[in-house]
Image (cartoon, rainbow, N blue to C red):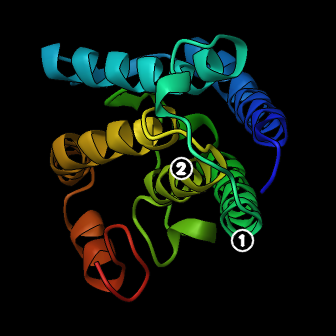
Amino acid sequence: MINPWFAKAIVLLANIVMVVIRAPHGKRSRTTPVAKSSKGTLEVILLTVAWIAFFIPLVWIVTPLFEFADYPLYPIPFATGIVFLVIGLWLFHQSHMDLGTNWSITLQMREKHQLITNGVYRRVRHPMYLALLIYSVGQALVIPNWLAGPSYGTAMVLLIVFRLGPEERMMLEAFGKDYEDYQARSKRLIPGVW
């Protein structure tokens, strides 16, 4: 068995890396004018759930609040989880880099918005969601707690279920035939599968 403090250190480091990746893009996003916003009540609820789920592992790290749901941490799930976290963070970083000024935390079209179909977007239309799913699997494997471990994954599944459709409709409306062609040659979330 592995001491859970190792899991706490890895999760804290991974969350810091995620914030460091996103921060400059968030700052740039706030300075790029919005041409169209589809942000509604559902979007606010989904983002709130995602933020809460992001902080649940941090609460697990610094308080005993969730210790009733702890279980032993073993080397194989721990090491596998670290691999998933690293892959998820790499894809998260690359997705932001490839999107550039087109990224937004919510459903928005920016002025001079471009359809990005290169880099990690070549084969998958939503690699950032894929990155967050991979990351959440890693987190679930690294955190030996039935509540804190899968919390982020649960939020990401909800985000994907309720957001992918509206996001794709928004892109079809904005880019028409170009987006239809892109849909025909790429998968929604998983390369070669879906």
Pointer 2 local density, CA inside 10 Å: few below 14, some 14–19, many at least 20: many
**Which quarter of the rendered picture does the N terminus lie within?**
bottom right
- Kind of element beneath mark 2: helix
Q: Please give left or right for residue 49 compared with residue 51 in the image.
A: left
Q: Please give left or right for residue 32 compared with residue 62 in the image.
A: left
Amino acid residing under circle 2:
Ala
Pointer 1 local density, CA inside 10 Å: few below 14, some 14–19, many at least 20: few
Instruction: Determine which of the numbered discs, if any, sits on residue 185 in the image.
Output: none
- Residue 77 vertical placement versus 47 (above, below): below
**Toward the viewer: 84 or 107?**
84
- Residue 194 vertical placement versus 86 (above, below): below
First of labels 2, 1 by sequence position: 1
Residue with the mark numbered 1: 76
**Which quarter of the rendered picture does the C terminus lie within?**
bottom left
Q: Is residue 32 visible?
A: no
Q: Position of residue 69 (x, y in %)?
A: 47, 32
Q: Position of residue 113 (x, y in %)?
A: 45, 39
Task: Say which residue appears at 43% left-offset and 33% top-offset.
Answer: 147
Q: Is residue 15 visible?
A: yes
Task: Say which residue appears at 35% left-offset and 15% top-offset.
Answer: 48
**Toward the viewer: 69 or 194?**
69
- Kind of element beneath mark 1: helix
Residue with the mark numbered 2: 140
- Residue 18 vertical placement versus 79 (above, below): above
Q: Please give left or right for residue 34 compared with residue 170 in the image.
A: right
Specify the quadrant of the image occupied by residue 170.
top left
Specify the quadrant of the image occupied by residue 31.
top right
Q: Position of residue 146 (x, y in %)?
A: 44, 41
